[in-house]
Amino acid sequence: MNDPDFRPPTGPGPAEESEPTEEDSSFPEEQNPTEDTSFRSGDTEGAPVGTRGGRPSSRRIESSLRSLVDWVAVAVGALAVALLIKAFLLQAFYIPSESMTDTLNVNDRVLVNKLSYRIGDIDRGDIVVFEKPPAAPGSITDFIKRVAALPGETITFVDGEVFIDGQLLNEPYLDGDTHPNSAVIVSEGCTNTPAADRCTLAEGWYFVLGDNRNNSTDSRSFGPIEEDAIVGRAFLKVWPLGDLGFL
């Protein structure tokens, strides 16, 4: 039947579905996989030095240098502290003679407190280390004795016994009798005329004696000592270990 109102379509017909080819895929990323070049087992030219048995890395060298600097700093600091302690606080001395036996024997070691007299007074009975007096004989540069008389006091010797301002000095540390002093006490530090058995001490001067009174070079021969010459107070015997203890 011919329908004048109907005309066949003049455009192209329905599209035909094309057959999938081998090049087409539902996973586009699988079509042309790219080669992974992020790792190549045979390529070692770009490996950091030191990762395969080579020379130490710069980081390891820097760490070693830093450790060395740290140890040097510790050693220098310890040395500085030791020098400061020796200069201002504590110092060890050895006993070179028999002048202080039986309290201290030859080659004993003692610790001396250098700060003691910066904050306190020198007392009678203290064992002190002091610089060699000008009138003292021998080559020993430091002496150690016991303080017997203080500034302003008068010390007198009578038959080997010691009197301070007329009062007998109690000396339990002495071992045995002592002989009378026969040397004339030098005048420096004494306000009285030189005498063999008497000295009145000037301000800032101290009269020191060895405990081994019969074998001691002390203020009876080289005179009193100035306060400025006193290094410090011996307070602890540290050698021999069997005699360790306070003085």
Image (cartoon, helix red, strand yellow):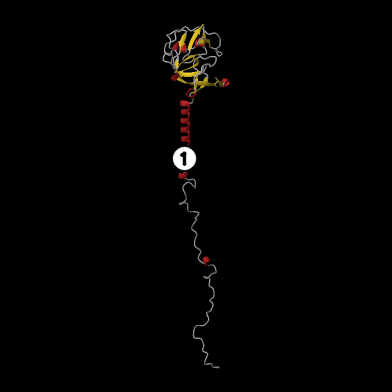
Identity of the residue drawn at 45% across and 44% down: 58
Residue 177, located in which quarter of the rendered image?
Answer: top right
Q: Position of residue 210 (x, y in %)?
A: 50, 13
Please state which of residues 201 and 5 is positioned toward the viewer in this rendering.
Answer: 201
Q: Position of residue 140 (x, y in %)?
A: 45, 17
Q: Residue furthest bottom?
A: 1
Relative vertical location of residue 37 with respect to residue 152 in this rendering, above or below:
below
The answer to whether 16 appears left or right of 192 in the picture is right
Please state which of residues 132 and 67 is positioned toward the viewer in this rendering.
Answer: 132
The number of callouts visible is 1
Q: Amino acid at mark 1?
A: Arg
Locate the N terminus and report the quarter of the image it occupies.
bottom right
Q: Position of residue 181 (x, y in %)?
A: 48, 7
Residue 57 seen in this snapshot: no
Please state which of residues 196 and 47 is positioned toward the viewer in this rendering.
Answer: 196
Q: Position of residue 12 (x, y in %)?
A: 50, 83
The answer to whether 88 appears left or right of 244 in the picture is left
Give the class, few, some or many, for how many residues have Cα within 10 Å of label 1's Cα (few <14, many ≥20): few
Residue position marked by numbered label 1 in the rendering: 66
* Mark 1: secondary structure: helix
Residue 219 seen in this snapshot: yes
Q: Residue furthest right?
A: 242
Locate the C terminus and report the quarter of the image it occupies.
top right
